[in-house]
Amino acid sequence: MITRYVTFVALKIGRALLTLLVIATLTFMVLQMAGDPVTVLLGPDATDEMIRGFSERLGLDRSIAAQYGLYLANIVRGEFGMSFLHARDALDLVMGHVSATLLLSGTALLLALAIGLPLGAYAAIRHGGTGDTIAMTFAVLGYCIPNFFLAILLMLLLSIQWPLFPTAGGETLRHLVLPAITLGTSAAAIIARFTRSALLEVLGSRYMVAARSRRIAPWRLLVHHALPNAAIPVVTVVGFMVGGMISGSIIVESVFAWPGIGNLLVNSVANRDIPVVQVIVLLSGATMVVTNLVIDILYGWLDPRIGRRRHAA
Amino acid sequence: MSASPQPIIAGPGHRRQGERALHVMKDAHLRLNGLSVFLPDDHGDKHIVQDVSLNVPHGELLALIGESGSGKSMTCSALAGILPARMRVQGTALLDGVDLLAAPQCAPSRSSTAIIFQNPSQCLNPVRTIGFQLVETVRMHRGLAKRQARTAALDALSDVGLDGPERLMHAYPHQLSGGMNQRVMIALALATDPRLLIADEPTSSLDVTTQRQILDLLEDLRRQRTMTVLMVTHDLSVALERADRIGVLHDGRLVETGKAGQVLTAPQHPFTRRLVAALPKLGGAQRSIAPDTVGNEPANMPQGASLAFKGVTFRYPQGRLATLIGRPAPLTVTNIGFEIAPGKCVGLIGESGSGKSTLARLALGFETPSSGQVLVDGKPIDDWPRRAYRQAVQPIFQDPHDALNPSLRILDQVAEPLTVQGLASRVDARNQAMERLEAVGLPVGIASRLPHQISGGQAQRVVIARALMLRPRLLVADEAVSALDMTVQAQILTLLRDLIEREGLSCLFVSHDLRAVSTLCDRLVVLYRGQVVEQGRTEHVIARPEHPYTRRLLSAVPKGRNEQHVVTGVEELVFR
Amino acid sequence: MQPETDHQIAAAPAPDALVATGSPHRWTIAQIGAAAWLALCVFLALFADLLSPYDLTAIDLRARMEPPVLLGGSWAHPLGTDDLGRDMFTRLVHSIRISILVAIVGTLIGAVIGTALGFLAAQVGGLVDDLVMLLVDVQAALPFMIIALMLIALFGTSLTLFIAIVGIYGWERYARIARGLALSARERGYVTAARAYDAPAIHIYRRHILPNVASALIVNATLNFPEIILVESALSFLGLGIQPPMSSLGNMLAFGREYLLSAWWIAVLPGLVIVLTALAVSILGDRLRDRLDPKLK
């Protein structure tokens, strides 16, 4: 029945909106707790005139409930105030950094998929063999070597020892290489682990044994029976990476001075440029929520047991 | 998988090998010769199946009987070529003279066997349609073009008695019932044109009525196609009814084989004799004392409490969202009415989903009726003080290992009802628990063990002992024996009957198994789709079933070929 | 007494063999190495003050950026010195102490809060359940680094606040696990039996539910612990975690970044310590999981 699927999607959208509302509310509460909004949001150098306009815009002379309403309205209108570090509209400022983060995260993710998927699948098929051991050693190391240390090792080797790539900046595509490798390696390790365990679980399932007993050719078993089932958990983790790209790239952008949102966030936090921080927090929440929504809807297509059509019986 | 080409074990197999040449041409059949399955280990191999030799003539059905862990499923896996990677086989398994164990996975001889399994719904790929899986199998085995393969797949679905094959082709396994999925599994097996069909507990996860239909289907197909069938089951009565020959596996060894009737009338091995003795019979034939007529209670049985359901209707509370939309919850049970007199045992029977477990929960006071009343000793449950009610009514569960806390020692678990309610000091409670454990026939050594260290039958005895600690007056047993092996079932039923008689308890015995219920209960209540469709004295219901469902239920009980030995209840009563 | 002829009885291990059911759990070389490394770290953390040859902040400008012994340095500074001539070994020992302390306290806070909320949601149900699960969803939707950075931006960098923030890390996973397990445990026969003899809810959770779900929570903690070490050092690396004059592995690494060209060991040594520690906990965690995870039995 189509209605079942529509209900399913509608419920997911409702849940996503609710999550966004709660994120915004929590941000509002934390801002309230942080002290006088004038000093918090305007910075130390605000003029009297600025303070007056600001108080009016946020309704500071009114009740908490009214302030909350205004706060939500301002979010919907896209008014987040000025960055006092850069003296620009905070939203504009953040949006100016989006493309750099997208470029870096996208490259890293493609790299991670290209390495992680085949590696994990290979490890599962050769379960217990040498290939499995090597692949999993890579995966464990990728998980245990933090981004910032890997970044420094790469710099040490590929910029200082052999000066192939620049250490910092974001002007050319050559600047992209080291941050993308750093970010891609840890993601590849995670993807490889998930692919391996998902595929192992599927390969050990009863329907695979039953299909094997019908003597379906091995490649068909893998491509047509195992992989579609194993895809479901792998899509989850990849979706999580896409949704968390802002936070995932914070450290790498910061180390390599890549001009993306993560780098902007670290600088804003260090300088207490709260309006910018606030925009990035909400943007990152929204990214995650929207990605989750897309993944959930994708599930309906990947897994017939969720939502969608119902034919017989 | 490594299979030794030569039989390792000589002996009886040796002689048969000489015969082989004579039989190969005119008579195709399955011959196992010294088949062993084992797990190689540094400290000596661990044998799962040991030296099994048997013979299934062409077109016959051999039932392999055994309790859990007897190695029967491993035998199937070995023959179907799907053993877990670490397992090794020895011996030969000749089908028409070709060794199945020596043949590599894709050899032609391999495609002459097919296998179906216990849980059909788990054996079909959840993200592929039925049509995809069938067409694929047909194309693989018959080398047909896509369109022809589709036609063949549709035919296969019709062959196994499924309606609307066109529609089913687009369905996913989760949209079908267990019985339908088992039919699909059979269609998949037939699509490979097998000469040997291996059926590993093909009906154990299905309702009795569905079970019968599937067994009938298998029998029809076997005759039409003159297939040889090797069926594995834990249920001796199913085997007796359906099989030409029976092989009995015990601890991985074949302890007995023979014609079905022969095994039943003259069992040789002690284990087989126990199996035969444990065969449940319809109609209370095992009851030691004659059932007394209602209203004529002996004076020494006042202890049991009475239980009455009066017009009870129940629907599960609805999720908030559904309530918001205003959709009412489906009724689970409707207008239920029956009574249990003090000291009586009433059997509540119905298939899964009929609402019988809901009634058990209502009787235990875990759920409150949406309308109507559940009365114990004439008093509605709500009017009872909670603690007094909890002492008076105690549950016994289906899966005894699930009913025991895996991290607590047996003695502490049995003593806990007393300590929790402050009815006895810790020491005192332990002493009483010890006595109870002995009273239910458990050895002293059990007390200090953890649940996973005891068998299912022992665990169920522990559960019963714990339920008796508070000296209850009504037992509510929900499928109390269905998770146990056949011989253990009989022992537990005997124990329950003894306890109920000795202590004069009342008992609500919920089950899907008519045979178990009829050995224990004075009265039967038949539940069908949430409604009581029939009730009465056990013998009456069995002799003169009125509702069509009861009749179906009765006819679904496997009777065995050798009627006079198994079907005591029905036949005698019907023709008396 | 009736003779029960179940083969299971014969196969059942004696009570004292309980701990090691299944395949023999031999220690691999990697596991021994991991245990040894962790033992060393704990030892260093406990006796940091006795073991460090110099004062944490003792500056010796004559001995700046001396290499470790094996790279031509002297035994006066076995692991070399940093840009201000401070002894690397001393600083590393103190950093290990801080990192382990933060990780242990952080893990405990997350585990206690998460488990308590999970059990509460399962037991009370209804609105409380909805609320807890909504918070879990929100936490899962807002990456931890973002939350941590926002809180640091608003409230500054103090050690107490930092530990509290790290403690939040991963609470939602404990909550989700505890709630799920409690809900399924409530359906188990032994809990139903306990309810049927009227055991109080507290008793049921303490004696019947917690012992049987503890292994899953411990397994989660072993996953959580190395992640907290990484999160802590990442924040310190960004200069937003542990602040000088206190030294942590993360901020040592960050300062060392300036001298990659001339004295790379200042950055690489603390980095290696982080990797080895996270690796060791992971390896031992895997071992623990194999022994505890009921699914693998």
Image (cartoon, rainbow, N blue to C red):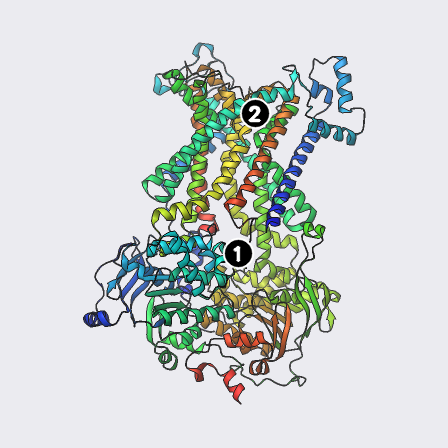
Q: Quadrant of residue B374?
A: bottom right
Report the disc number at residue C241.
2
Label 1 marks a residue whose chain is B
Under circle 2, the secondary element is loop
Specify whether B549 is left or right of A158: right
Report the disc number at residue C203.
none
Q: Residue lying at the far right in this picture: please name it.
A: A62
Relative image position of residue B362 (x, y in whole percent) = 66, 65
Quadrant placement of the N terminus of chain B = bottom left
Relative image position of residue C230 (x, y in whole percent) = 50, 30
Q: Quadrant of residue B260?
A: bottom left
Q: Which residue is mark 1?
A: B175
Specify whether B33 is left or right of B211: left
Q: Residue lying at the far bottom in this picture: please name it.
A: B576
Amino acid tagged 1:
Gln
**Which residue is rendered at x = 55% and y = 53% of the image?**
A310
Frontmost residue, B32 versus C245: B32
**Which residue is rendered at x = 52% and y = 17% of the image?**
C57
Is B528 situated above or below C233? below
Q: Residue lying at the far top in this picture: please name it.
A: C62
Frontmost residue, A200 versus A141: A200
